[in-house]
Image (cartoon, rainbow, N blue to C red):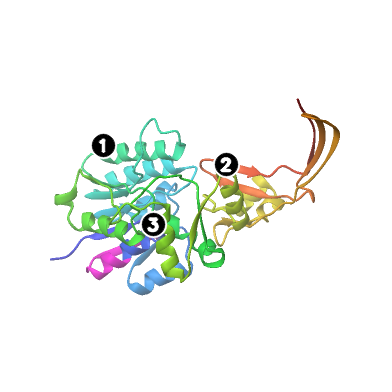
Amino acid sequence: MLKPRILVTGATGKTGSVVVAELLQGGYSVRAMVHREDGRSARLKAQGAEIAVADMSDVERVADALKDVQRAYYCPPFDPYMIQGAVAFAIAARESRLEHIVSLTQWLSSPSHPALMTRQLWLVDRLFSMTPGVAHTIVRPGFFADAYLALTGFAAHLGVFPWIYGDSRNAPPSNEDIARVAVAALMDPARHAGKSYRPTGPELLGAKDMAKAIGRAVGRSVRVVPMPTWLFMKAARMGGLPIDLNVADMAFLRQQYGAAILSKVNFERGRVRPSASFDASAGVSLYQVDRKSVRLQADVFNLFDRLNVINFAGVLSGTALQARRNFAVRLNASF
């Protein structure tokens, strides 16, 4: 019996690439949808996948990618036009008589969530569930284990595990396990249509448990270091935050943002380039008698007046630049 052809969007990503590999191993014909042809798409092609180049918001290209396809794995792009892309996908799915969509979403997606992207994912879930004639299965993991492993560098070099979530615990699933849940649903729509699954890891882990596990992997003792959010984000900026934009027209981006800002973005890696700034502060005690004191303090922020990009074209945060060199003078009095 001829097995159906399956489209995998986000095919070079952390779950999409595994979905492609698992389906090919199972004997399915796979069309891998990618943003551009590069080394990652070449590896998928070498495995046996057919490559389709398309941006999710391009209705015509998405429709072409769905031709002669019976099932699809939908991995939502973190893109300002995510809703437009989902509508385009739903229309093309309906017109191509797609049988089944397995979509990746978020565990907490809801119409009242404070995060825009999470509210949009809830809308996408509803959109696909209401698409006539197309079965729908939802895969809704929480934090990926991969997110915690991003801190491995701190553990290996400094022996610390930065943590901003207090006493919380989580059972994070691996990229591979999330992908295998999607693959199981794609292989058997009759069993999984209309259902929602939340993949998890085998047990709940707190910060100390995660630090211990990473310590075993890197071969050294690792301790948890509670960290305020502002400090965590500053450290992340110095490492270069990921960008949420699918680059299609560099001329448009240059006109929109200017060459100076674009020079701070590594489009090949999909990240803002690492940045750093220097602040200086000096103070003098003007008056001190018993418990009474007057102190004058002067601060200079971004001393060398560097142009630092914090976020670039983020679906949630837009484009944010660090403030240029600025000054503050404070007079503190205590009684």
Q: Determine the residue located farthest toward the left in the rendered image.
A: 1
Q: CA distance from mark 2 to mark 1?
A: 31 Å
Of the numbered discs in the image, which one, if any, rests on residue 318? 2
Q: Which mark is residue 130?
A: 1
Would you say 104 lies left or right of 151 here? left
Mark whose residue sits in front, 3 or 1: 3
Name the residue nearer the viewer: 213 or 105.
Answer: 213
Amino acid type indicated by mark 3: Asp
Q: Quadrant of the N terminus?
A: bottom left
Q: Quadrant of the C terminus?
A: top right
Q: Magenta span has 12?
A: no
Q: Which quadrant of the structure image shows residue 27?
A: bottom left
Alpha carbon of mark 3 to alpha carbon of mark 2: how far? 35 Å
User: What residue is pinned by disc 3?
Assistant: 209
Check disc 3 and report its element: helix, strand or loop.
helix
Q: Earlier in the sequence, mark 3 or mark 2?
A: 3
Identify the mark nearer the N-term, 2 or 1: 1
